[in-house]
Image (cartoon, coloured by chain):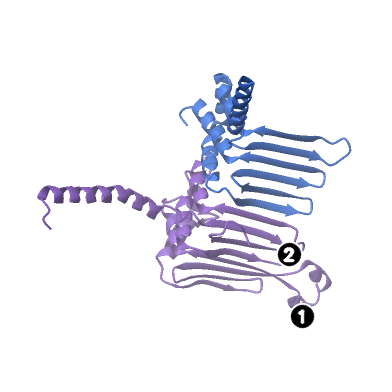
């Protein structure tokens, strides 16, 4: 307790120095991705199990490497969208509208050919598409029998689940650009999860993120 | 007699140190086999240090020429080579169908590329450190990247 003012001053300045030296590290740690997270893509043929594609990429590697790619539409880790329009749809405005809207089911389409559902719930955006089409073999055999047609439907199911934080990060680059690197960082910070699942009669596709370096 | 023993010891120690230096980066291995009559079979092992050393000894204008040609890809090569060293073990790509199989992986700090088909087999093993050395040397030869 009997510290001299000089000793106290030394202690305070040392603490300030340590705090200042740690601040940038903490700031970097907050903005950087989790180095242990991997993105996995697996495509498997259903008919022939020997046809497979497996891709495993560390998120940290993707975050560092993507800005080094200079392409027509991909530059500095950002994808440029021509005039922000894809088939007359303003993607940026649409995503921004979803981002700012409350939780709920936005799109529900149910037809004889496909079902589409777009919803937002608990900070996640869900897109589910189920396509129903008659399989080629049975369609030929039962082309004139409507009753038999329903029984021979070939289903393909697409399920996409994206955290809204990732959508936010994706849109952070401004209009006409999607910030892929920021989205990857946000995705990594979100933890293990399945992003895309596609199942049809021919093949299955799965995209997920976890901390394993192999796709099991 | 003592002189001979000393000389042998000195030579042996020098050989051991030289050997350790030559192989400290590992070995680059390339195997290529064509599984048909009269097909080519190429197998070679090169100490990775030889690549780094030859890049230092190569004429400056040759390196500059190579660096200028590779200029658009140098930032990408630099980042990939840096990142690969952080993942000494991991499988990045595996694709297979009825006709063959392709695999790109890091195993014990070496980049392994395997391409297998019924009629051709290719195996390439390159230490990640060597890829980084090549990227660094090319970047040095092409300043401003």
- A3 left or right of A214? left
Residue B124 visible to the viewer: yes
Q: Residue A45 carries which label?
A: none
User: On the image, numbered disc 1 is attached to which residue?
Assistant: A147
Label 1 marks a residue whose chain is A
Above or below, A19 relative to A192 = above
* Quarter assignment of residue B43: top right
Residue at the bottom extreme, as displayed: A147
**Nearer to the camera, B65 or A166:** B65
Query: Which residue is found at the position 27% from the left and 51% from the top?
Result: A19
User: On the image, numbered disc 2 is attached to which residue?
Assistant: A46
Nearest to viewer (mark 1 / mark 2) = 2
Label 2 marks a residue whose chain is A
Query: Which residue is found at the position 19% from the left and 48% from the top?
Result: A13
Which chain is the one coloured purple?
A: A
Residue B62, horizontal then vertical, whole percent: 59, 21
Q: Earlier in the sequence, mark 1 or mark 2?
A: 2
Looking at the rendered structure, the secondary structure element under dot 1 is helix
User: For the C terminus of chain A, which image quadrant?
Assistant: bottom right
User: How packed is label 2: few (under 14 Cα within 10 Å), some, or many (20 or more)?
Assistant: some
Residue at the right extreme, as displayed: B37
Which chain is the one coloured blue?
A: B
User: How packed is label 1: few (under 14 Cα within 10 Å), some, or many (20 or more)?
Assistant: few
Residue B131, horizontal then vertical, whole percent: 58, 37
Residue A69 visible to the viewer: no
Q: CB atoms at circles 1 and 2 under 8 Å apart? A: no
**Nearer to the camera, A31 or A158:** A31
């Amino acid at each position: 307790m009997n510290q001299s003012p000089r000793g106290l001053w030394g202690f305070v300045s040392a603490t300030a120095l340590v705090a200042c030296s740690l601040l940038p590290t903490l700031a970097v740690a907050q903005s950087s991705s989790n180095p242990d997270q991997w993105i996995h893509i697996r495509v498997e043929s259903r008919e022939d199990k020997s046809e497979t594609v497996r891709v495993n990429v560390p998120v940290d590697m993707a975050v560092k490497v993507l800005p080094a790619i200079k392409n027509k539409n991909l530059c500095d880790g950002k994808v440029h969208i021509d005039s922000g329009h894809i088939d007359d749809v303003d993607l940026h405005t649409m995503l921004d509208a979803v981002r700012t809207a409350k939780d709920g089911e936005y799109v529900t389409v149910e037809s004889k050919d496909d079902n589409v559902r777009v919803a937002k719930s608990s900070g996640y955006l869900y897109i589910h598409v189920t396509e129903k089409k008659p399989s080629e073999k049975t369609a030929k055999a039962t082309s004139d029998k409507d009753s038999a047609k329903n029984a021979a439907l070939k289903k393909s199911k697409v399920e996409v689940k994206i955290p809204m934080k990732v959508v936010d990060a994706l849109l952070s680059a401004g209009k006409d650009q999607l910030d892929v690197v920021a989205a990857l960082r946000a995705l990594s910070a979100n933890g293990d999860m399945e992003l895309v699942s596609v199942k049809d009669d021919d093949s299955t596709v799965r995209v997920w993120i976890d901390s394993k370096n192999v796709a099991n | 007699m003592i002189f001979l023993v000393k000389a042998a010891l000195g030579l042996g120690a020098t050989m051991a140190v030289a050997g350790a230096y030559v192989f400290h980066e590992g070995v680059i291995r390339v195997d290529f086999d064509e599984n048909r009559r009269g097909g080519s079979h190429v197998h070679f092992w090169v100490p990775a240090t030889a690549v780094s050393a030859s890049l230092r000894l190569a004429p400056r204008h040759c390196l500059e020429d190579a660096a200028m040609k590779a200029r658009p890809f140098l930032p990408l090569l630099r980042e990939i080579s840096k990142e690969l060293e952080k993942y000494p073990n991991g499988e990045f790509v595996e694709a297979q169908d009825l006709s063959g199989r392709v695999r790109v992986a890091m195993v014990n700090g070496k980049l392994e590329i395997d391409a297998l088909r019924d009629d051709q087999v290719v195996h390439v093993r390159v230490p990640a450190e060597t890829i980084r050395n090549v990227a660094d040397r090319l970047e040095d030869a092409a300043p401003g990247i």
